[in-house]
Amino acid sequence: MNQHALPLLALVGACTASILFSELVNAQHASVATPAADIVAVASGDTDFATLVSALQAADLVTALQGKGPFTVFAPNNAAFAKLPPGALDDLMKPANKKKLVDILKNHVAQGKITSAEIKSGRLKMLNGEKVQVVVDNGQVNFGDAQVLRADITASNGVIHVIDTVVMPD
């Protein structure tokens, strides 16, 4: 072996070790679970909640649902809002009707994190003070007049269950 080959082999060995170590560190960072986004960020990232997010903004409830919580949100999807009578949603989004919109939206939020495994039949107290009837039957959950379509969408400050109907307060 000539005198230049030994330092070259040492350099190649050091570079290989450095690359392997770097890949190991990067793999470990990739496997560390990052905390989920808050309820508003999760909803904002799903186009099926575009109407809900707009309503939360109009009602000035975004900051509240970004709070510590935990919260359980029975979130009407876009199709649920589309079931409202013609013009009803536009009317609710007007500043003059903000109080009514807040009441309706709070009728979909419960204090605490209630997963689908923890949901029981009975009356569930919502943030607006109303109690909504929940029925669990053969694995199907109904929230008021709404059916839960997707359950247990995790957020850092609670959980979201997608429903197919906007549930109006009494």
Image (cartoon, grey):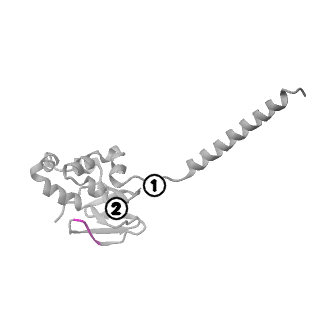
- 68 to 91, vertically: above or below: below
Where does residue 79 sit, x and y in percent of width and height?
27, 48
Distance in Å between CA atoms under marks 1 and 2:
13 Å
Is 107 positioned to the left or the right of 86 in the image?
A: right
User: Mark 2 — residue?
Assistant: 68
User: Mark 1 — residue?
Assistant: 35
The residue closer to the viewer here, 63 or 131, is 63
Magenta includes 112? Answer: no
Which residue does the image show at 77% across and 37% down from the upper left?
A: 13
Residue occupying the far bottom of the picture: 122
Quadrant of residue 61 in the image? bottom left
Residue occupying the far right of the picture: 1
Q: Which mark is residue 66?
A: none
Which residue does the image show at 18% across and 63% down from the upper left?
A: 169
Mark 1 or mark 2: name the one nearer the start of the chain. Answer: 1
Range of the magenta residues? 123-127
Give the position of the C terminus as an image quadrant: bottom left
The residue closer to the viewer here, 14 or 55, is 14
Which residue does the image show at 32% across and 55% down from the upper left?
A: 66
Where does residue 90 sit, x and y in percent of width and height?
15, 45
Residue occupying the far front of the picture: 3
**Secondary element at image label 2:** loop
Where does residue 42 sit, x and y in percent of width and height?
37, 50
Type of the residue with mark 1: Pro
Is 99 positioned to the left or the right of 115 in the image?
A: left
The residue closer to the viewer here, 68 or 91, is 68
Determine the main secondary structure of the stretch shown in magenta. strand
Quadrant of residue 99 in the image? bottom left
- 80 to 15, vertically: above or below: below
Crowd band around label 2 with a 10 angstrom C-alpha radius: few (<14), some (14–19), many (20+):
few
